[in-house]
Image (cartoon, rainbow, N blue to C red):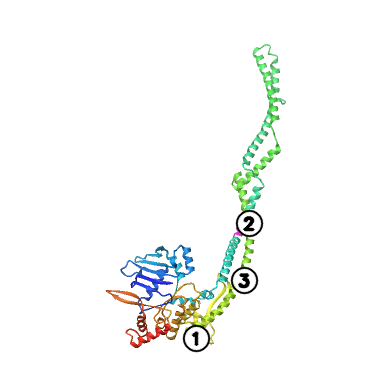
Amino acid sequence: MLKEIYIQNLAVIKEAVIPLDRRLNIFTGETGAGKSILINGINAVLGQRCTKDIVRTGCDKAVITALFTELSDEVCAKLDELGVAHDEGEITVTREISADGGSVSRINHRTASAALLKEIGAMLINIHGQHDNQILLDSDRHLQILDDFGGDDTLLKEYRVTFRELQQTARRLGELKKQEQSRLERSRTLNEIIDDIGELELREGEDDELEKEYETAKNSEKTLIAIKNAVSLITGDETANDMIVSAETEIAAFTDNSTQLSALYERLSAAEIELADIASELEAFADKVELDGQRLEYLGTRLNNINKMKRKYAADCEGLIKLYDDACREIMQLEGSGSEIKELAEKRDALLHKVTEQAKALYDYRETVAECFTKRVTEELEFLNMAGVIIAVKHEKGKLTVNGMDTVEFLISANKGEEPRPISRIASGGELSRIMLALKSVIADKDAIPTMIFDEIDTGVSGKAAQKIGIKLREIGRVRQVICVTHLSQIAVMADNHLLIEKQIVGDRTETHVMQLDMDGRVAEIARIMGGEDPSDLMLDNARAEIKKACGL
């Protein structure tokens, strides 16, 4: 609970220490005394946005510190999760707002972010102001109120686990289906690569090896042809050898008469022998040259096919092999995606069936809760001087959402015999306040938030209705700490702890003081609310009697 608030230099509050009771705490004071400043201060320590205008004029900063005690197990678990110490179930939360617009937040004197304050504050205090009546006008919020009343969120949690799994599965399935067309196109490309390159059964470096072998094979053929031609020119008819023999014959008869001619004849004879020997060696060399026409044809075709693929895919032999291997791996993944689509579709259908059954169970549970809810709220409304008002829950099945298949809207009938209609069309401001209080009342013992703050919940009501609101606030105060700002005596008399917010002139400055009232102080304040300033003795007696009556004295 919120045990104490310390405020320094907050607007017109110079300094105040405000003690709070575990039950019903009432703040009263004249209009403009600064009751709204108190709520602003509490909002500040809860991490809400605040401006530098809230700092007291002439001061460097405003400081608000709240002491929370008797922390629930849920709050302690959250603090542990966030790494925040909570010795003996207590924490202090401080917010400093500088005149230059900056702010510093602390938990147990350690710096904390405003977001952290907001997260923890939402588990410690629930503030209900006039604007919160808009919750009643927003049918989207009615389902949450109904669930809060039911108190058992087991079915909802189980449903949400399945629903989120269904969402994730459907999202993944949708993504895969969107990729299906491009997958098919990519698959065609990959299969073409696999067919083209796979048919070649390439080895690394094979193209270089084939080029060398092919060049060698081509040179062998040319060499053989050249040798044959050379031999033919040497030994064939009317070739070099015959011409040399003819030359020898021509000069043979004259060699005896000329030593020089004899020498030339000898040289022609030697040339004949040399040519015959060359021809013989050429024929021997030719016999050693291997020539495989089929191999040459194979090499040419193989190289042509490889070069064709190299041009098509702009890659060398190693690049083609890598392209083929990558294509094989990718095609397996794509085929895996196709099987994943089938598996996900089956999983989605199974989850859809399961989540639908869970939604039906949740709907049936809420139907039962709604019956009990309307009965309890109607009883509370009757107590709050709204006899004859009937509240109904319009509960229908709709599409599946994270909250189930339920659509819920609260309807009321303000007069007997009239059909219930949406609250937004029927209720006045005062009726909205009482309806909201009735709702808070029926869920008070189920709400995990220990402190409830009501800021002028008495707006638009008076007389007996105000008295009933006070009684109801007192009842809630038995199970939750309640802090209420009011201007009605019927509510103020119900206080377990009555605090007065009062403006005073100190020197040349206005200051707002917050004082905890004893019995005499309460009597004087209640009398002031009932009859204005300088109340008569009769008014004071009436105030005292009302306080005693409210307290059961």
Q: Give the range drawn in magenta.
A: 179-187
Secondary structure at badge 1 equals loop
Q: Residue 357 carries which label?
A: 3
- Quote the CA–CA distance across marks 2 and 1: 67 Å
- Residue picked out by circle 1: 387
Where does the C terminus fall, quadrant-wise? bottom left
Q: Which is more N-terminal, label 2 or label 3?
A: 2
Is residue 38 visible in the rendered structure shown here? yes
Label 2 crowding class (10 Å Cα cut-off): few <14, some 14-19, many 20+?
Answer: few
Which is more toward the observer, 534 or 462? 534
101 vs 450, left or right, is left
Which is more toward the observer, 254 or 282? 282
Q: Which is more N-terminal, label 3 or label 1?
A: 3
Q: Which mark is residue 336?
A: 2
Q: Main secondary structure of the magenta part?
A: helix
Is residue 311 visible in the rendered structure shown here? no
Disc 3 vs disc 2: Cβ atoms closer than 8 Å? no
Label 1 crowding class (10 Å Cα cut-off): few <14, some 14-19, many 20+?
Answer: some
